[in-house]
Image (spheres, rainbow, N blue to C red):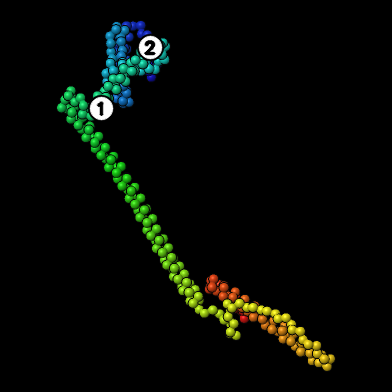
Amino acid sequence: MGRGKIVIRRIDNSTSRQVTFSKRRSGLLKKAKELSVLCDAEVGVIVFSSTGKLYDHANTSMKSIIERYSKQKEECQPLLNPASEVKLWKREAASLRKELQCLQEYHRQLMGEELSGLSIKNLENLENKLEKSMKGVRIKKDQILTDEIKELSQKGNLIYQENQELHKKVDLISQENAELRKVYGERNVDEANRASRPPYTVENGYDLHAPIRLQLSQPQPQPQPHNSEAPASSMKLGSRIELGRQALSRQDSLVNAVDKIQYLKFNTSQDPLKYKEENIKAFCL
């Protein structure tokens, strides 16, 4: 049969009560030790027997555990009065002031000051710390310099490529300018050759630059012929009028031809490349 359930109540028999206390105390301390080892916990157990005898267990130090417990309890408890609050802040300020003094003293020692109170071992430890710090500083410095050198190298490569592209563009522009100068030089030579040619003249001996003057003469009064000579005089007068009209028509044609030649000469002197074949055809017409 299984064990019956034990009723949790005070044992009246003093002997039985003492035996149960001894067994349960040993089990409790054993469990506390196992808890501290398995869970890496800071455990402290304090037990007072009914006779007033003390039994305790702590995996580190019972004093430090009690101080930590008191401090943690004061921080977690709500402040009930201003006096407790002032006391708490004073204790916090004192702790921070002490920590600041330690840091200032350590800083002065790192700077090589106030070393008179240090032993050989402390000086060696300080020297090792300084060497480690210097080594870390040098490593960081070298890394920064290496990064800057890489960045400058990349910028230098980009500038070199841009310089090469600019040189290519300059060479291309120089070639284009040389070709343009060659084309304009040939054009200027053609214009100079055309300017050195003799002026255009008409095959019949008329100069284009000579002004053309046309003048109409007044008809001279003719003596009245006899009646027998009237038909002959009329025929002669009609033939003269016809000849005059033909002369005026030839003069008008000559004037138009001269104007066309001057127009063609003006256009060819301005720009020989604009001399069109249709202008020659118009002149021929």
* Residue 138 sits in quarter: top left
Which of these two is toward me, 106 or 206?
206
Question: Disc count in the image?
Answer: 2
- Vertical placement of 53 versus 207: above or below? above
- Vertical placement of 146 versus 222: above or below? above
Quadrant that contains the N terminus: top left
Which of these two is toward me, 280 or 14?
280
- The residue at the point 28 percent across, 9 percent down is 53
- The amino acid sitting under disc 2 is Ser
Camera sees residue 7: no
Residue 14 percent location from the top left of the image: 32, 6
- Give the residue number, with chain letter if any, for mark 2: 84
Residue 202 percent location from the top left of the image: 59, 82
- The amino acid sitting under disc 1 is His
Please tell me whether mark 1 sits on a helix, a strand or a loop. Answer: helix
- Give the residue number, with chain letter if any, for mark 1: 107
Image-based side of 190 in relation to 97, left or right: right
Image-based side of 277 in relation to 70, left or right: right
- The residue at the point 81 percent across, 92 percent down is 229
Quadrant that contains the C terminus: bottom right
